[in-house]
Image (cartoon, coloured by chain):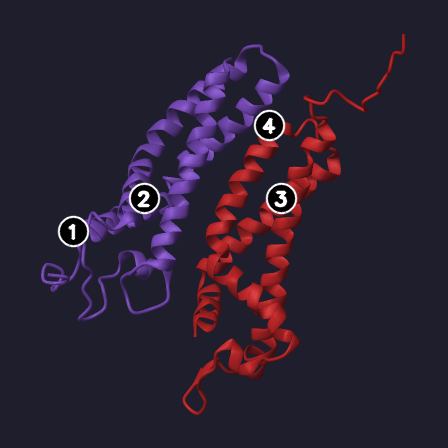
Chain colours: A red, B purple
Amino acid sequence: MLVLEIHWPYAPCVSQPGSRLVAARLLVVGQLSMVALYLAGVVVPYLLKFTLEGIDHCSSTTGCQAPGDVFSGPMLVLLVPAMIITILGPMAAVLLLLMSFTSLARRRREMSAVLRRSLFGAAGLTLAFLVFTLLPPGRLLLGWVLD
Amino acid sequence: MTKGLWRAQLALVWAFGLAVFFFLFGLLGGPHGGNSNGVYDMVYGPLPEGVSVRGSLAFPPAWFTLLAMAVAWLAPLIAAFLAWQGRRALKGDGEQGLRDRIQAGTVAAFVILVSYLTPIGWTLVYGLTRWTIMSIWGEGPEAAQLGS
């Protein structure tokens, strides 16, 4: 009688800690990408174009300049997702923070020290981003993007 | 130490978080008060001169802000109860995994409770209550005439 032995790397219905932690890693990547895009696509361009020149995006001579009036070409590729993050980011940040809490509460002992620190760090950055968007500089950037 | 306590703490954290989500939705997306760009003015300030908002129960966000308002009002009471229950449960023995979860849930319940001792909690309650009333009954001198 022919007996086929198939050695599965693990039981098919039981996920390993490593595979379960993929979601936690994705969460860290998502949060860091969101903050990085916001900084690179909205905060830094505004600082370089207006704040360092000592002006606002609205002036009596030029009127209000929208991001599309100031930047063009490849910069728009960075600017468009950053604009979406500026508008919807604060609400998305709340959901990401809730997911971070759930992940850390349930699985922090299964995580490596690096992943645990990354999750805490990314959650801290997301919280800082959320607070910044509600402060006057963040509100100014939202006003610029909505122009 | 039971799973029920952890589930209740997790439900509180998510409900409170979603209330904050709908607060931000009302703040950034809906009509708001004041003429400045400041959050304080947008929550507490009157509508700009000549602006009225029509209220309607058929307006779906009214239902979401109503639910979020109920959560915002009840959250400090439930958080106090769950923080106290969590502290009591952590004094006893239990499975390590469940202990970790209840520890995190208890810290979160304390944080929610403490936020009501700061302007954060009260602004959340005031904002959600105001936007619920505004969404259902309208606000401003012309509110009753709008849409008729």
Percent position of residue B12, x then y: 42, 31
Please determine if labels 1 and 2 lie on a single subunit. Answer: yes
Label 1 close to label 4 by CB (< 8 Å): no
Q: Earlier in the sequence, mark 1 or mark 2?
A: 2
The quadrant of the rendering that contains the N terminus of chain A is top right
Q: Is residue A44 visible?
A: no
Q: Which residue is mark 2?
A: B64
Percent position of residue B61, x then y: 30, 49
Q: State the separation of the CA atoms marked 1 and 2.
A: 15 Å
Residue A123 located left or right of residue B78:
right
Query: Dot 1 surroundings within 10 Å: few (below 14), some, or many (20 or more)?
Result: some
Q: Quadrant of residue B53?
A: bottom left
Q: Chain of mark 2?
A: B
Q: Which residue is mark 1?
A: B137
Q: Amino acid at mark 2?
A: Phe
Q: Which residue is mark 3?
A: A27
Query: Dot 3 surroundings within 10 Å: few (below 14), some, or many (20 or more)?
Result: many
Q: Chain of mark 1?
A: B
Q: Which residue is mark 4?
A: A106
Q: Amino acid at mark 3?
A: Leu
Residue, x 19% and y 71% (percent of image)?
A: B49
- Secondary structure beneath disc 3? helix
B123 and A90: which one is in front? A90
Say above or below: B65 vs A78: above
